[in-house]
Image: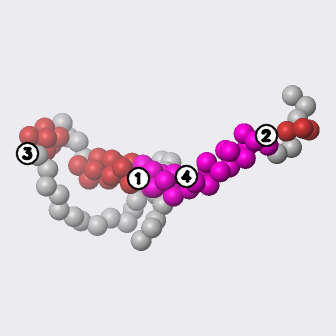
Amino acid sequence: MNTILRERPGLPYSAARRATNLSLSVDVLETAKALNINLSQTCDAYLRKVVKDEQERRWRAEYAGFIDAYNDTLREEGLPLDEWKSF
């Protein structure tokens, strides 16, 4: 599944949830619990960011050739409609 994660203003995480098992460092887990940190929300938010960053990295890698070619064209020919720019 190649789903693009989008920001969800006002919603910290998706309503659809699935239980999963994680292995966490004991010291970090105990400290997080002592600080009343919601592990599910924290892990979900961080994983969402990691997934989004990786999707962006892959998109840039996939389209790097096109972007380079477009930038070369702009350097050689200038911006389209640039001759009619009034500022």
Q: Indicate yes or no whether the magenta region holds residue 59.
A: yes
* First-in-chain label (1 vs 2): 1
The span from disc 2 to disc 4 (Cα, nearest Å) is 20 Å
Which residue type carries mark 1?
Glu
Pick the front one: 23 or 75: 75
Give the answer, above or below, for where 1 lies relative to 44: below
Structural crowding at the residue carrying mark 1, measured as other residues with C-alpha within 10 Å and reported as few (<14), some (14–19) or many (≥20): few
Q: Position of residue 24 (x, y in %)?
A: 14, 50
Q: Indicate yes or no whether the magenta region holds residue 73.
A: yes
**In this figure, which residue is indicated by the disc labeled 4?**
64
Does residue 44 appear to the left or right of 83 in the view shown?
left
Q: Circle 3 sits in a helix, a strand or a loop, which is it? A: helix
Does residue 86 appear to the left or right of 14 in the view shown?
right
Q: Which mark is residue 54?
A: 1
**Of circles 3 and 2, which is in front?**
2
**In this figure, which residue is indicated by the disc labeled 3?**
26
Which residue type carries mark 4?
Ala
Pick the front one: 61 or 5: 61
Q: Position of residue 65 (x, y in %)?
A: 58, 54
| Magenta part of the chain | 53-79
The span from disc 3 to disc 1 (Cα, nearest Å) is 28 Å
Residue 24 shows in the view: yes
* First-in-chain label (3 vs 1): 3
**Of circles 1 and 4, which is in front?**
4
